[in-house]
Image (cartoon, rainbow, N blue to C red):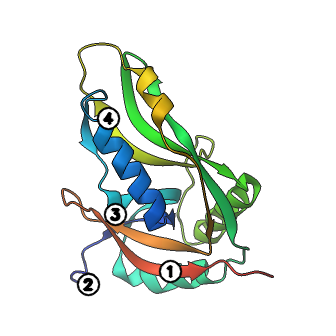
Amino acid sequence: MMKSMGQPMRLFVAIPVPEQVGEKLEQWTKANRERLPFRKWTHVQDYHITIQFLGETTIEKMDALQIALRNIKSKPISLVLNGVGFFGTPKAPRVLWAAVSGDLLALNSLHTSVIQATHALGYVAEDRPYAAHMTLARSYAGENEFLAEALKSAPKGIEWKSDNFILMRTHMNASPMYETIGSFPLLET
C-alpha cells in the first residue's frame, strides 16, 4: 500500500495479463530456464503490457493522475499471445519478451491517449517507438550464443479481451514487484 506522504512512488500504466496467459508463459519459462539462462526472471504475477512508464510520482500528484486516466475513453482490446523474442543480439540478449498481436491499432490508440493525458501533468513519453510486449526475463547469463531454437516452443494463439488498464507501482527488489493501485475500464462505446 501507499507509504508516507513525502515518499515518491515509481509508477507505470499497463494492460494486465489474464491468469490463463500468465500460467502458459510461466509453464514455458520454467521448462526453458536451463536452455535460456537469464539472470532475472519475471514473477508470473508481474506479467503485463506496459503502456507508459511514468517514473517517480508524489502522493500529491496521484489524484490528478487518476482523474486524467479515468477520463480516457477506449474500447476493450482483443489481444493474442504470439510467441517470444528478444531485444539485443544473439550473443548478448538484454530482454526476453512475449509477443502480442491482435488489435494493435486499438492498443496503440490507448497508448497515445495515455501519453496525451499524462503529458498535461508533466510526464514525458519515451523517445523510442512503442513496442507492445511482456517482459519474461532480463540479462542473459549464458557463456554461449543465445539458443534461438528454444523460442520455437513458446506459447502462441492464446486470445483474450482486455477490458481495463491499470496504474501500477514498483516495489524494487521485491517478488512479485508490482502492485496495482488503480484500474480504469475500457468500455464499448
Q: How crowded is mark 4: few (under 14 residues within 10 Å), some or many (20 or more)?
A: some
Q: Position of residue 117 (x, y in %)?
A: 64, 71
The residue under label 2 is 5
Q: What residue type is labelled 2?
A: Met
The numbered mark, 4 or 3, whose residue comes first in the sequence reads 4
Per the image, label 4 sits on a secondary structure element best described as helix
Comparing labels 4 and 1, the label whose residue is closer to the camera: 4
Q: Give neighbour class at mark 2: few <14, some 14-19, many 20+ (Cα, 10 Å).
A: few
- Considering every residue shown, the one lying at the far top of the view is 144
Residue 32, disc? 4
Mark 3, secondary structure of its residue: helix
Residue 74 x/y as whole percent = 72, 73
Residue under the image location 24 percent in, 26 percent down: 141
The residues tagged by marks 1 and 2 sit, at their Cα atoms, a distance apart of 22 Å
Point out the residue furthest to the left here.
Answer: 173
Say which element carries label 2.
loop
Q: Name the residue that disc number 1 marks.
A: 183
4 vs 85, left or right, is left
Q: Which of marks 3 and 1 is nearer the N terminus?
A: 3
Q: Residue placed at 68% from the left, 63% from the top?
A: 78
